[in-house]
Amino acid sequence: MHFIITDASLAKSRAIHLSGTRLVLAFMATALALMIAAAGLYHWVFLKGAREGWPVFGALVKLVTKDDVEQRERFVRENVDAMARRLGEMQAKLVQMEALGERVSGLAGLSPADVRGSPARGGALVSGRPLSLEELQAALSEFERTAGQRVDVLTVIESRLLDQKIRSMMMPTQRPLAAAPLGSAFGWRIDPFTGKQALHTGLDFEAVTGTPIFAASGGVVVAQELHRDYGNMVEIDHGNGISTRYAHTSRAFVKQGDLVKRGQKIAEVGTSGRSTGPHLHFEVLVGGVWQDPRKFLDAGSRPSAGTPVAAASPQPAASRAGR
């Protein structure tokens, strides 16, 4: 495309040649300039009419603003309703958690009233009247407070159950010998050395020399010594005033101050001390008072064994170990 520009005053002309590419670029530049100018003019006229209250422009501004506000309100309402439904579901789960806490509280030694606290409110929050944003915020605050209370109560329950588990693990309920027949039981009998009636303060398990002896529960070794009556003896403190003794051993694999675990090998059967033959004399003491070890061992052999309660009643003087 050729353009010829003629200047009459100078009596000269000028020719301009535009290729296809140049023509397209020129057209696009012109269109862009017109669009910018139109947008600027529209913006200026629109704002001026809105500020000065021109009849046509004022109505347009109100219409556009109203549509925008309605869209925002509809968006907020949909989100508030969705959040309310979700909060209702969470409150329903909180009610289930409260019921579970009441059932578990009995195992932890707590009353249901301690677990229940303030009553939980379940069900959906969205009813016939939609919730306002302020009501939803208040419901969220109440839910957060109630959930915090439940967490505190469940933490207490966990602590109680953990304490009970530790106490049960520290009870001497495991047999000190894997499979050994019971010889002399706990109680009054004829002493094999004096021929007189005496209290046998533990259980005698018959086994050959060298049979492994295991700790009936975890604890600390408070004595490993050669005793006149008990012979080579190991005594373990299990806490809460409970201790066990393992007498007449041939060898001890622990020493005073050692920390032992339940089922750990601590010695081997022998016939040292006041003994008529190889066996293990096993004692359980509560507060320094002899108790019948069978109450503890029988509790450990039951699938749902509870904590054995040993009455710490004074015992008369007795001949200690021996058979």
Image (tube, rainbow, N blue to C red):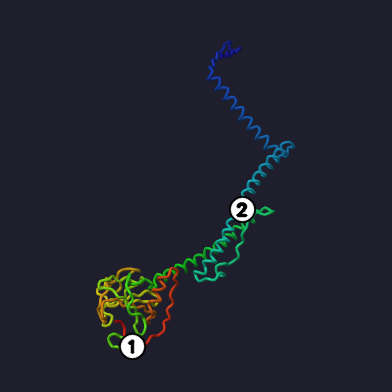
Residue underneath mark 2: 85
Residue nearest the observer in this picture, 14 or 59? 59
Query: At numbered mark 2, what does the secondary structure look like: helix, strand or loop?
Result: helix
Give how far apart the Cα atoms at labels 1 and 2 are.
Answer: 78 Å
Q: Quadrant of the C terminus?
A: bottom left
Residue shown at the point (41%, 84%) measured from the top left:
313
Residue shown at the point (29%, 85%) measured from the top left:
192
Q: Residues within 10 Å of mark 2 (few under 14, many from 20)?
A: some
In this rendering, would 245 be left or right of 74? left
User: Which of label 1 and label 2 is nearer to you?
Assistant: 1
The relative height of residue 137 versus residue 50 in the rendered view (above or below) is below
Considering only order in the chain, which callout, 2 or 1, is on the residue closer to the N terminus? 2
In this rendering, would 64 be left or right of 172? right
In the image as oriented, which residue stretches furthest toward the top? Answer: 11
x, y percent for residue 78: 63, 48
x, y percent for residue 99: 56, 64
Q: On the image, which quarter does residue 191 sit in? A: bottom left
x, y percent for residue 320: 31, 83
Q: Quadrant of the N terminus?
A: top right
Label placed on residue 197 = 1
Residue shown at the point (48%, 66%) measured from the top left:
158
User: What residue type is disc 2 on?
Assistant: Arg
The relative height of residue 216 versus residue 124 in the rendered view (above or below) is below
In the image as oriented, which residue stretches furthest toward the right? Answer: 55
x, y percent for residue 122: 61, 59
Residue nearest the observer in this picture, 305 or 285? 305
User: What residue type is disc 1 on?
Assistant: Gln
Query: At numbered mark 1, what does the secondary structure look like: helix, strand or loop?
Result: strand
Q: Residues within 10 Å of mark 1 (few under 14, many from 20)?
A: few
